[in-house]
Image: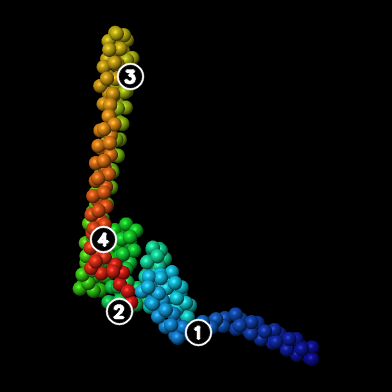
Amino acid sequence: MKKMKYIMVISFMSMMSIVSAQTRDTVPQINKKVNPKIERNSIRKGNTLYESEKFTESEIEYRKALDANPESWLGTYNLGNALYKQQKMDAALEQYKKSVVNEKDSLQQARIWHNIGNVFLQEKKYAESIDAYKNALRRNPKDNETRYNLRLAQLLLKNQQQQQNDENKDKNKDKDKDNKDQQDKDKNNKGNQNPQNNKDNKDDKKDKQQQQQAPPQMTKENAQQILDAIQQDEKNTQEKVKKAMMQQQKRKKTDKEW
């Protein structure tokens, strides 16, 4: 009987040990304590550096703010602005997307969507930038700067699509020309195999065909004129886009800051 009691005690102690171990495993980790003071001070320092155009240093301060409070909406948004100014577009877009999800105020959401549109515009993803600007205007229809950027993105998208269409047409023309040349070549080869053709006539036709197919010689002056025309065309397009962007900069800054 004593032996049975001993076994029961041992079993009970083993069960308690297992329960205790499971309890320790399932205890949630204590979240890092938020430090509002460090968060506020770091954001203030980051803003001062940002206004002085020290964007790398401001990025460091905003990251300190997020280290003090990972849920800081303002720290996330301002970090996105600092990254944008450093042309780190992918990283900036990531921060903007985080901040727009966590923000409920429609006007602030509009500012974030505006900046998301700017990122896509810089990367020449005009269709995506148009969607972002439209999201901003749904939340703030009175924002004329966003409306201007939307119109600019639409014009750039149209120009981009036109260029793609022209390139596709040129490719199709080259393909059709290659097919026609191949057909002519096959036809000539078939004619050469006809035993009734006279050898002298074949040679004459061959010489005549070569003369017809030979491309006209281009002089150095003609080549330079064509090159100048292409460069001028490209220069005009760049100047139009640059002028539009300068007008945009004069109205307001492209990114809305806090």
Q: Nearer the viewer, residue 194 or 52?
A: 52
Q: Please tell me which residue is depicted at 26% across the width and 49% down the height of the picture.
A: 235
Q: 10 Å neighbourhood of mark 3: few (<14), some, or many (≥20)?
A: few
Given the image, on which type of amino acid does mark 3 rest? Asn
Disc 2 on helix, strand or loop? loop
Label pair 3/4, CB-CB below 8 angstroms: no
Q: Position of residue 110 (x, y in %)?
A: 28, 73
Residue 30 seen by the camera: yes
Amino acid residing under circle 1: Lys
Q: Badge 4: how crowded within 10 Å, few (<14), some, or many (20+)?
A: some
The disc label shown at residue 189, or none: 3
The residue carrying mark 4 is: 245
From the image, state whether disc 3 or disc 4 is nearer to you.
Answer: 4
Tell me which numbered mark, 3 or 4, is placed earlier along the sequence: 3
For the residues marked 4 and 1, what is the alpha-carbon distance in whole angstroms? 45 Å
In the rendered structure, which disc, 4 or 1, sits on the residue that comes first in sequence?
Answer: 1
Amino acid type at mark 2: Asp
Tag 1 near tag 3, CB within 8 Å? no
- Residue toward you, 199 or 68: 68
Q: Residue at x 42, y 73 (%)?
A: 58
Which dot marks residue 105?
A: 2
In primary-sequence order, the first of circles 2 and 1 is: 1
Q: Which residue has dot 1 on it?
A: 33
Which comes before the other along the chain, label 2 or label 4? 2
Task: Give the label, 1 or 3, closer to the camera.
Answer: 1
Residue at the image point whose x is 34% and y is 58% from the top: 123
